[in-house]
Image: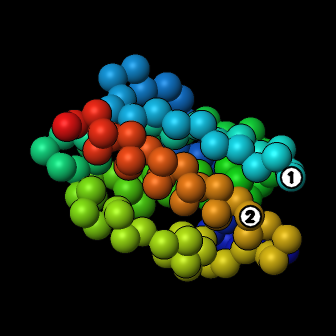
Amino acid sequence: MYSRQVLQQFQNTRHVGELPDANAYVQVDNPGCGDVLQLAIKISQGHVTDAKFRARGCVAAIACASQLVDMIMGKPLTALQKFRREDLLTALGGLPETSTHASQLAVDALSAALKGAIRSNR
């Protein structure tokens, strides 16, 4: 059902927790399935220097959040503004059709966090 990458992210999540000195913190949810994702990012000199998440939801939601944070660490904001759901799906080896909502939740969280970080740095 799930790819090896999805199961690996789910079973070995990294970057879980709080980030008290975050430049941006967001919480997004999917009312249809009940998944909730909290994402906090810290930015310095135009790059993500740290990020943490907390997720409540299905295997795919947790795996997507973990993979997302892996993918954004150290990246410049300019590159992250072009981040697409397909980038996440490719890194995870795909998701079953019934679970693709989890990848959109992660990308929505990143988009909202970037908007918050840009506003706070003005």
Q: Is residue 37 left or right of residue 35?
A: left
Q: Nearer the viewer, mark 2 or mark 1?
A: 1
Mark 2, secondary structure of its residue: helix
Amino acid under label 2? Answer: His
Residue 35 in the image: state x and y as whole percent.
77, 46
Residue 57 in the image: state x and y as whole percent.
78, 45
Residue underneath mark 1:
32
Amino acid under label 1? Answer: Gly
Residue 29 in the image: state x and y as whole percent.
71, 44
Name the residue located 79 percent from the left edge and 67 percent from the top edge: 99
- The numbered mark, 2 or 1, whose residue comes first in the sequence reads 1
Mark 1, secondary structure of its residue: loop
When the figure is inspected, residue 89 is found, relative to residue 34, above or below; the finding is: below
Looking at this view, is 39 or 73 the one in front? 39
Identify the mark at residue 101; answer none if there is no mark: 2
The coloring applied to the image is rainbow
Q: Are marks 2 and 1 in contact (CB under 8 Å)?
A: yes
Query: Which quadrant holds the N terminus?
Result: bottom right
Looking at this view, is 4 or 55 the one in front? 55
Q: Which residue lies furthest to the left in this view?
A: 45
Residue 96 visible (yes or no): yes
Label 2 to label 1: alpha-carbon separation: 10 Å
